[in-house]
Image: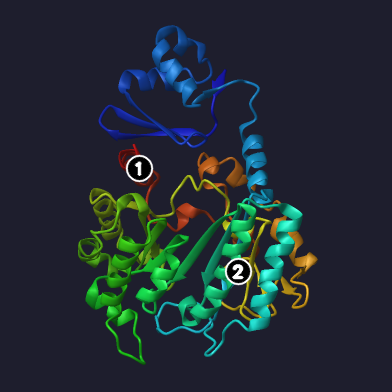
Amino acid sequence: MKNSQYQFYEEILPHQFLHYCSVSNCFLLLNEACHKLFEENVQNVEVIKARNPKLYDKLVENKFIIDDTIDECGNILVGKEKMVNSDRLYNVVVNTTLDCNLSCWYCYENRIVGSKLSSGVIEAIKKNIYLHYETTKFKTLKLSFFGGEPFLYFDGIKQLLDYSNVFCSERSIELIADFTTNSTLITSEQINYLKQFRCHFQITLDGGHSSHNKIKVDKITGMDTYAKTIKTLKEINEKIDKRWVAVRVNFDNRTLRDIEEIIDDIDFLDRRKTYVIIKKVWQLKTEKVNTEALKNAIQTFLERKFLVDYYFMPKGCVCFAERKNQVLFNYDGKIFKCTTISKFNDENALGKLDMISGKIHWNEEKMKSWYSDMQPSYCKTCKWFPACLGICNRQLLVNKDKICTFDACNLTQKEYLMYLFKYNILKNELYK
């Protein structure tokens, strides 16, 4: 038996040590005596077994101590490859439009006014779903609507969902409808239509009432976008039973001051069907973040029983764009993978959609680098690697210097570990 290479600890209180294994995502809180016994015998774990059998059994059970024959890194890479190649889920991402009804100062996308799915592209996407099923027999179809603001063209959403609903029902396939939206255009009628589906929503609140309305401005109607977002969240919470709601807070230092107001206004949300994503706007430099306000925001959400995704680990899976059974259809038929590119143009396109057959013609040269093993050695030896799974290839392609999740998150390892520990305690409480 040997020590796992993917485990470490932090002293979180005097004489109290929090040990973490990123392979199993397990925590052990040890007193000083147990901690010393473990750390002083990492090269001879049989001593632990002889002196404290209960501690030894816990360490083995939670994979802090493993069999000598186990190749941990190799197993992680094999598991990651299985995720990349899995054909159980077909994730179809659709940019219904690259237009938007709001003007947010931090938005990175190239807005195209008046753009929307044509009937030809809609029909070709339907054919593609059929073709892909014939070759993979996927068990779940996830339709993810993105943009722009996808609800600017709800008719396109409805056409694809109506087709997919019949298609999946006839073949006993699970259907998931997924939306990344500012929610201000969603109507009661649309929610009544969507309640028949299993729905995932990512909806943004950029601060409290005043801050949000200064950022998310509807220049045509002048609507109170914050009030409309809260109203939509309430209606989703009340009417759509099979739902998963992510409330995303894109923060700058001013936004972080509004956390209590945001929580008060979304307190009605069912914690078992909701989580909060906290993301820094890209214009705010990492070194300029008010770290105390950030830590307070995370702590406050957790205290109010909201699960918080802040560079959360373990990721549980690779990024959706790294999966081979995933595609992004732009409104004009161009093919992509990732949603975080600034321009959905020919230069960034990874293929084209055959409008007659629904077949995708991938750019094989571009796809070689997309799926190649570019993971740097410093990721594979990092103690967080099993939880993080490394940097995605798209980021590695555009960043030649060393990059790491922890470079951007403004938390020390000890602070991050405590966040993760509290998250897991809350998760166990919510889903016990």
User: Would you say 351 lies left or right of 427 here?
Assistant: right
**Camera-side residue of 172 and 136:** 172
Q: Is 81 situated above or below 190?
A: above
Label drawn at residue 427: 1
Mark 1 is surrounded, within 10 Å at the Cα level, by few (under 14), some (14 to 19) or many (20 or more) other residues, namely some
Nearer the observer, disc 2 or disc 1? 2
**Looking at the figure, which quarter contains the N terminus?**
top right
Indicate the position of residue 292 as horizontal and vertical percent values: 26, 57
User: Would you say 112 lies left or right of 309 here?
Assistant: right
State which tag comes first along the sequence, 2 or 1. 2
Residue 400 seen by the camera: no
Label drawn at residue 379: none
Disc 1 residue type (three-letter):
Lys
Quadrant assignment, res 393: bottom right
Indicate the position of residue 16 as horizontal and vertical percent values: 29, 28
Q: Is 6 situated above or below 174?
A: above
Task: Name the residue carrying label 2.
Answer: 163
Q: Is 341 situated above or below 101?
A: above
Q: Secondary structure at mark 2?
A: helix
**Looking at the figure, which quarter contains the C terminus?**
top left
